[in-house]
Amino acid sequence: MLPVLFSFGVLLGCTYAITDRACEGGTLYLSCPRGQSINVTYANYGRTNPFSCSSGGPQSTNCYSPYALQTVRRTCQDQNQCSISASDSLFGDPCPQTYKYLEVDYECERSPGQGNRFYTCEGGSLYIYCPAGSYLVVFSANYGRLSSDVCPGPGSNNINCESPGSVDVVRNYCEGLTNCQLEASNAMFGDPCPGTYKYLEVNIGCRY
């Protein structure tokens, strides 16, 4: 199947970065101004310095939760505001005996509704590009099925099918580039619901 070509409009408006932390046992609140949404760029539950949320006793400063970014994005990505607890129950315990904290870097951007939403059915591909001098910004993505009306086929009534790593895969292939190609395939995203005919949905824009 030949690639599908799309030309996107440019996203305007300011973007600014924020870093927030919450000590172990606390709750981290992320928020953006009205009309903007959260884009999580970094997250860690653990400890990387001795000063934040300091506590007595020896503290490991090489402590990382490998699932922190994925967990925070699943809760907060593309939301206007959200809350997430800094807890072992949510992130696991990457360094027992060390008092940990949750640290998140995020940007406030124009809401995903200001981007462009595109679909391609399982087995198809998307060739995505921006005008010269601009680059791709990925707001959201899912490979699976959240609607029975898009790409109807076997198992279309299963509308609770999400591949949790979709946005990370799309960002890895496309974020910051002028063009990229995505395949709506189990090979690229895994198979979140065997027996269901799936589709790839992406919400992407361009920024100068």
Image (cartoon, rainbow, N blue to C red):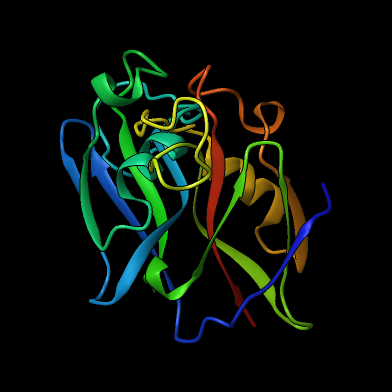
Q: Image quadrant for the C terminus?
A: bottom right
Where is residue 195? Give x, y as percent: 52, 17
Q: Quadrant of residue 8?
A: bottom right
Where is residue 158? Give x, y as percent: 37, 28
Farthest residue, direction right: 2
In the picture, measured across the screen, residue 56 lies left or right of residue 177, that is left
Residue nearer the viewer, 196 or 181: 196
Residue under the point 73% across and 48% down: 125
Q: Quadrant of residue 157?
A: top left
Q: Is residue 203 visible?
A: yes
In the picture, measured across the screen, residue 8 lies left or right of residue 29, that is right
Residue nearer the viewer, 50 or 90: 90
In the picture, measured across the screen, residue 79 lies left or right of residue 4, that is left
Where is residue 63? Give x, y as percent: 47, 27
Where is residue 23? Give x, y as percent: 23, 38
Residue under the point 48% across and 71% down: 115
